[in-house]
Amino acid sequence: MYFFEGPGFIQSLDSLKLVMKNQARGIRFGESRSKFFGSGLEVSHLKNYSTGEDVKFIDWNASFRLNRTFIKVFSETRENNVYILIDSSASMDFGEPETKRDLAVKLAYCIAYLASAGSNKIYAANFCDSVKNAVEITKTNINARFKEIIGRAASGALQNRPTRLSAALNSFMANFKRRGLLFVISDFFDGGLSIADSVAKLAIAQNFCLIQTLSGDDMSISDTGEFKYEDSETLETVEISLTPEAAAEYSSRVSAFCAALMAKALKYGGSYKMARAGGGHMQILKEILLKTGFSGSGQR
């Protein structure tokens, strides 16, 4: 059984959707309001009726209550693009009992599900050193598409490729020209730590949110001693000696990297959220939605 087929999973998302809608004062997830007025689905305001205007838009309740004739003015709702990139490299396999990959796919599904409630075109894709197998997500095909995404990640076909975030983002920007909101879900660990250098370029092309999925072992090393270490992506084996001082230095460097990544995202107008594997997803998801403005307050 896939996680989205489990009892109560979709109901919890629908409950979150209702909470976000209430917080947004009626603006649906992912929708943006333009300065133009038209005959969309959402009432913007009422105005006094003028001779010659279409009587079918008269608000009879307000007119009878205030003893004047009012007509509804509708705000035009425009379609947004939502892009979701999911790191499928081997480093995402770490974490117990939930791996970073499990959490990344779960968050991607949740974002796609909630975005499908609004006027959005939604695309999801795996990536390692380039964006692979991008698919369009709709209300009717979301489960089938995510079964494909999970299957590709589990097959190992992508995991033998190294993570090159800068190359993957260049690949994405070359193929998706329309501006929208981009979610990049990854541990952001690659050989060159190249994401920091790509954020400025990314900000020119897209609104963006970086979601860093980490396991407990990513943040700190509990064991010390002599070890043989095999890089999960390059398969290179090295012998290392881990002292308490080296473990502390490792934790300090990882924390500094995460802080620098967040600072870079915020500097260029994006959003950043760290998510821990095994820590639950609903509260994290709610914070992500608020950070990105999907509550209706932050879309640009």
Image: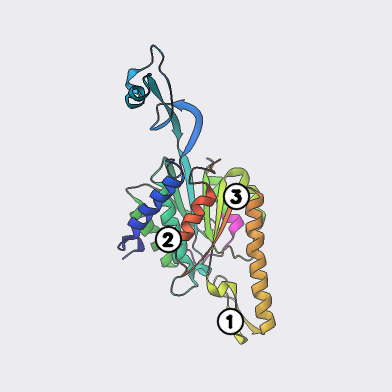
How far across and how far down the image is residue 126, in percent?
47, 57
Residue 74 to residue 112: above or below: above
Q: Amino acid at mark 2?
A: Lys
Write the residue at 41% across / 58% down.
149
* Helix, strand or loop under label 2: helix
Mark 1: give few (<14), some (14-19) or many (20+) Cα within 10 Å.
Answer: few
Q: Amino acid at mark 3?
A: Gly
- The colouring scheme, among rainbow, by chain, secondary structure or one colour, is rainbow
Q: Which one is in front, 77 or 81?
A: 77
Mark 3: give few (<14), some (14-19) or many (20+) Cα within 10 Å.
Answer: many
How far across and how far down the image is residue 107, in percent?
45, 58
Residue 106 occupies quadrant: bottom left
Task: Measure how far apart labels 1 and 3 are at the Cα level.
Answer: 33 Å
- Nearer the N terminus, badge 2 or badge 3? 2
Left or right for 144, reference 29: left
Q: Which one is in front, 187 or 128?
A: 187
On residue 222, the disc is 1
Is 16 a magenta residue?
A: no
Q: Which one is in front, 204 or 209?
A: 209
How far across and how far down the image is residue 28, in percent?
42, 42
- Chain part drawn in magenta: 157-168
* Helix, strand or loop under label 3: loop
Write the residue at 64% across / 59% down.
261
Magenta-colored segment: predominant secondary structure:
loop
Q: Which residue is mark 3?
A: 270
